[in-house]
Image (cartoon, rainbow, N blue to C red):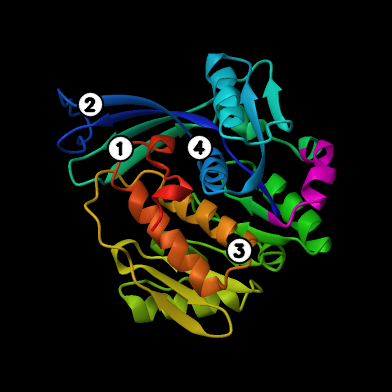
Amino acid sequence: MKKIVVIGSSNTDMVIKSDKLPNPGETILGGEFLLNPGGKGANQAVTAARLGGKVTFIAKIGSDAFGKNSINLYSSEGINTEFIFSDPEKPSGVALINVNESGENCIVVAPGANGLLSVEDIEKAKYEIESADILLMQLEIPLSVVEYSAKLAYEKGIKVILNPAPANELSNSLLKCLYIITPNKNEAEALSGIKITDIESAKSAAAVIREKGVDTVIITMGELGAIICDDQLHQIPAVNVKTVDTTAAGDVFNGALSVALAEDKSIVDAVIFACKCAALSVTKLGAQSSIPYRNNIV
């Protein structure tokens, strides 16, 4: 079985579902509360594991209850947690998430120990990364770690997938190390400088990003599905479902994409699979609580 290494963030999500998102200074009474493990890296690692992938997760947590609980949960999912490092002073990452009745959300993240994941930590996990087939990363950890890890993997011929979220300025030297980049609409606008209003403008943005050195650009477009730009352009339709909560949908997409590619599916079939998995995730509340298992995928 091909190995997927995920480097990224580990958070605990505190979610409140209310009728609407509050305006500045406004207090809203009522709602449903959920305490849920999250973080983009963790969500993607758990997704890949639940879908049948062989997964190692590299992250940094605090030596607090949140961090310890997270490691136990990852281990229970069958994830290799050998390279989850603990910081004795910083707390584990926490995200405060408000979700409205239509499933839209607003999120504030206190990164905590995620921000202390270092190149030195990556060096300790160097052999594990170099023995991987796919390296999956996001941007809730220091950019220096992402750049170093991408270069390390690229030089060993490992396929590097970057989910550029949250949006950040990326160097061309990093982009040239990537096999796939998976921005959403807003992130693709930031990377390309092109305003995306429809499928055609998304295709133009994807082409501009690809010219910077990435092999394949996949723009996730929510209800409009996804755009793939490699040597050709493909439009993959979305799966129609009733949306409850969009939290972690992008993470599920990336974790599922990695598993499909590890199983040697074509890029088109891999994105179709990832869209199905992401669609299932938005039908449930929460991050990891909404991640589907392989036997749920039709």
Residue 279 locus on image (x, y percent): 34, 55
Calculate the distance from the C-alpha at mark 3 to the C-alpha at mark 4: 22 Å
First reached walking from the N terminus: tag 4 or tag 1? 4
Check disc 3 and give the amino acid type. Answer: Leu
Give the residue at x 77% y 56%: 153
Residue behind mark 4? 39
Q: CA distance from mark 1 to mark 3?
A: 27 Å
Which x, y percent locates residue 154? 77, 62
Which residue is labeled 1 in the image? 285
Choose the circle earlier in sequence order: 1 or 3. Answer: 3
- Circle 1 residues within 10 Å: few <14, some 14–19, many ≥20: many
Label 3: how many Cα within 10 Å (few below 14, some 14–19, many 20+): some
- Report the front residue among 99 and 81: 81
The verdict on residue 124 being magenta is yes
* Of callouts 3 and 4, the N-terminal one: 4
Q: Which residue is mark 2?
A: 32
Image coords of residue 285 (percent x, y): 30, 37
- Whether residue 55 is situated above or below residue 31 in the rendered picture: below
Q: Amino acid at mark 2?
A: Glu
Q: Quadrant of the C terminus?
A: bottom left
Q: Are marks 2 and 3 in contact (CB under 8 Å)?
A: no
Q: Which mark is residue 261?
A: 3
Secondary structure mostly seen in magenta is helix
Q: Is residue 84 left or right of residue 206?
A: right
Q: Amino acid at mark 1?
A: Leu
First to last magenta residue range: 122-134
Does the CB distance between marks 1 and 2 fall below 8 Å?
A: yes
- Callout 2: 10 Å neighbours few (<14), some, many (20+)? few
At x 79%, y 64%, the residue is 157
